[in-house]
Amino acid sequence: MSKHPVLTHLASAVLLLAACGGEIPQGKLVNPADVKRAADAKAAAHAGSGGGAEEPAADEPIVVKPYEKVDLKDPRAAVPAMFRPVQVEPPLASEVQGLYGGTLTLGLLGESVDTFNPLTSNEATSSELKSLLFDSLVGYDNERWEHAPLLAWKWEVSPDELVWTFHLRKGVRFSDGEELTADDVVFTFMKTVFNEKVPNSDVDGFKVGDAPLPVFEKVDAHTVRATCSVVNATFLIAVGNVSIVPEHRWRDTVTGDQPAYNSAMGPENLEAIVGTGPYRIVSYRPGEKIEYQPNPWSWRTTASGQRLPFPDRFVAKLVKDNSTRSLQFLGEGFDFIDGIQVSDYNQFDVKEKEGWFDLHRLGTSLNVTWLSFNQNPNLRPDGTPKVLPYKLAWFQDVRFRRAISHAVDRDLLVKNILEGRGSAIYGDTSKANRAWYAPSTRYAYDPAKSNDLLDRMGLTRRDADGIRLDSAGRRVSFDLMTNAENALRCKVIDQVKRFCAAVGVDVQLRQVAFQEISSQLDDVHTWEAIVLGWASGVPPDPLNGKNIHLSSGRLHVHYPMQEKPFRQWEAAADGVLGQMSQITSESERKLWWKVFLEVSALQQSTIFLYSPNEYAATRKRVGNVRPSLLRPQTWWNFDELWARDGE
């Protein structure tokens, strides 16, 4: 056997996973060389396979276009008087140019926002909006797919990769005029993110197995040292996910068993929302809009000396569903729309010819749509089970999950519901993620296998409707939930109902507001089955989803926040992620990720369905648009955008 330490550990991990799942043939994935070959082998070689493995997409070069130029003698190029004097060393000087004034408007899905707290918000839209108000130490360039300096103008890491030193820009101020210092950074990490009484997903990025969390400490007013107990390959990503908040505002809210910080920055107290981002929030109307104005203490500049941002206002319109959002954009209701539903593509394709907006065809999405069953064995506050025991027994039986996976015709979903604009998937990494995609066991459409698996569970009796009965005569039936605002997902669950009926399983459909789904996933956990989607992290490294993949993760959907892994396979999978987290070589980390994808596929705790094609659009009145496949596709560089007409 190879003496390479990484591959030796990898072989051990594969053996353990094989023992847990009982599905990986001992002669296939026990040798490290076999691991490499297995990544390209036909998934049909594995037990339970329903077909061949997908092939990864080829790498494509990233082309970065030059920034557009404006007439800096134009009166609108003069820096408005509303900006307060700010001298930052060293400055963040972008090559971008633009003219001041006007309003830019964004259309967002959702009718309300529960919190503007950048730490406790989990929903994707809120997480993106936080970047308007807050900054992190490390930024990310969505066009180049690489890290970029932000509040920290540089950083160093020790030779053993355990000690990171971040050097802060001097002179950066919060939107209330107070200067940012190392104290704010240390407070953010040590008192909020790492506070066990403040539930959040950001902390998951710093977890490496059972190792203690890093320690952030002040070196001087503008230098912070982070000391890790073990190597964390994605430490910089985890740091970049954390928004820095002011200690002077929140130091008194982070103590006790129920810290007040958990409910801080709610919509009822907008003045308390203080950050270093380009904007500050000035009004919020549920079901209507969120209005932002430039942070008067904004510290970003251009190379020509202009202060950013350019618009007088930035407005996020809240829209109840995707169809309404598309209609409003096509009616010139706002300037940006991301994540256009594939069912609306033809309307945009036709209207683009009128010339007032650009339709960005971005290729296969990084996002994935999936189905999952609730395997949470815990009790509700009243002592009753979160999931009825007999249904929980079905959901925890891998044969049931595989049966449902085999019953679903993913290709038909893509053909009929996505109108061919998308790809069937069998794992949680889209082909569009060229660096991390790997093939895994496919549970292809096969009703015969589905029926056989259900029969082997003893669910052979049927009622007059053809629905299977368990040993107590109860119908094999479950509720399937999705968010009502997403018309495509509503069609998906209707089709899944038909697929399941064909193998004798009854599905009751539930279309609910996204706020209810968010509550269910965050706190309640009483749902039975759900169809939802994961938006890709930025950057799209799989370990940026530790809060999903780890058994202790807050969004580990089928059974979140486990004190210790509930199943042996989850303990082994956690171990794989832990090993992967400590390897800085991307090529070696990919080997571990392939193993994780395989054990995930064999368990089918999440049944992946498809990735749609990605479309976005922007009005031509918007300057400096630089579309990216990464979220948010059209306004990720919001601090550089400007209104050409000044209106």
Image: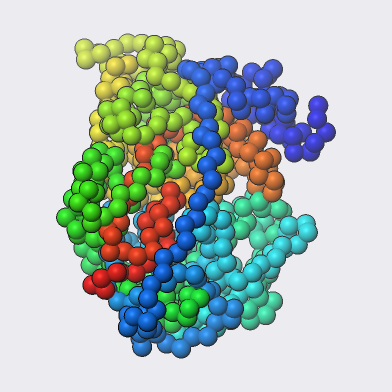
Q: State left or right for residue 1 relative to residue 327.
A: right
Residue 117 falls in image quadrant: bottom left
In the rendered image, the vertical position of residue 428 relative to residue 637, given as above or below = above
| Residue 147 rendering spot, x and y as whole percentages | 57, 59
| Quarter that holds the N terminus | top right
In the rendered image, the vertical position of residue 329 relative to residue 601, given as above or below = below
| Residue 271 rendering spot, x and y as whole percentages | 35, 78
| Quarter that holds the C terminus | bottom left
Q: In this view of the protein, which residue sits in the foreground, 337 or 101?
A: 101
Q: State left or right for residue 270 relative to residue 394.
A: left
Residue drawn 39% across and 19% down? 445
Q: Is residue 111 visible?
A: no
| Residue 69 rendering spot, x and y as whole percentages | 41, 69
Q: In this view of the protein, which residue sits in the foreground, 75 or 285?
A: 75
Residue 280 falls in image quadrant: bottom left
In the rendered image, the vertical position of residue 7 relative to residue 68, given as above or below = above
Q: Is residue 587 visible?
A: yes
Residue drawn 49% across and 45% down? 548
Q: State left or right for residue 137 relative to residue 325.
A: right
Q: In this view of the protein, which residue sits in the foreground, 534 or 588?
A: 588
Q: In this view of the protein, which residue sits in the foreground, 339 or 177?
A: 339
| Residue 23 rendering spot, x and y as whole percentages | 58, 20
Residue 577 falls in image quadrant: top right
Q: How is the image coloured?
A: rainbow
